[in-house]
Image: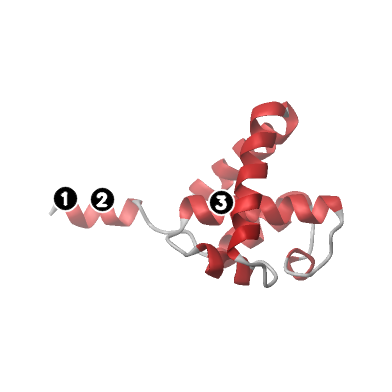
């Protein structure tokens, strides 16, 4: 009986939902997030999306990369390390992550 309720609360977030929340937060079109561009603000948003995808979904690194503009698994690992490092050193960046995590966990 309890299993039914526990599974409902631990619902997996979709990649599309993560992309939508991150893009809305940074005011970027989703197409730009999935593009090949290397503009700093886009790269950072893409890395954050990969970080949350790894953290909140059961997707493989290769699948996450494919959803984020055809990147490979090593790029996803690099993105997660970069996000973790920035979160430790940059207070403003940590604030972005906290805000986004709240928005992603609302539903």
Q: Residue at x 38, y 57 (%)?
A: 11
In three-dimensional space, the C-alpha distance between marks 2 and 1, rounded to whole angstroms, equals 6 Å
Q: Do the residues labelled 2 and 3 touch (CB within 8 Å)?
A: no
Disc 3 is placed on an element classified as helix
CA neighbours of label 1 inside 10 A, class few (<14), some (14 to 19), many (20+): few
Disc 1 is placed on an element classified as helix
- Circle 1 residue: 2
Q: Do the residues labelled 2 and 1 touch (CB within 8 Å)?
A: yes
* Most foreground residue, 14 or 64: 64
Disc 2 is placed on an element classified as helix
The residue lying furthest to the right in this view is 39
* Most foreground residue, 87 or 75: 75
Above or below, comparing residue 39 to residue 89 in the picture: below
CA neighbours of label 2 inside 10 A, class few (<14), some (14 to 19), many (20+): few
CA neighbours of label 3 inside 10 A, class few (<14), some (14 to 19), many (20+): many
Q: Would you say 63 lies left or right of 5 here?
A: right
Residue 63 x %, y % = 54, 70
In three-dimensional space, the C-alpha distance between marks 1 and 3, rounded to whole angstroms, equals 27 Å
Above or below, comparing residue 87 to residue 18 in the picture: above
Q: Earlier in the sequence, mark 1 or mark 3?
A: 1
Q: Residue at x 70, y 57 (%)?
A: 46
- Circle 2 residue: 6
- Residue 52, labelled with which disc? 3
Above or below, comparing residue 100 to residue 14 in the picture: above
């Amino acid at each position: 009986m309890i299993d039914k309720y526990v599974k409902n609360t631990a619902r997996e977030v979709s990649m599309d939902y993560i992309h939508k929340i991150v893009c809305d937060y940074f005011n970027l079109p989703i197409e730009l997030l999935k593009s090949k561009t290397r503009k700093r603000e886009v790269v950072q948003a893409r890395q954050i999306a990969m970080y949350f995808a790894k953290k909140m979904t059961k997707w493989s690194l290769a699948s996450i990369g494919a959803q984020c503009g055809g990147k490979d698994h090593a790029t996803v690992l690099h993105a997660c390390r970069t996000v973790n490092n920035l979160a430790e050193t940059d207070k403003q960046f940590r604030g972005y992550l906290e805000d986004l995590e709240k928005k992603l966990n609302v539903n």
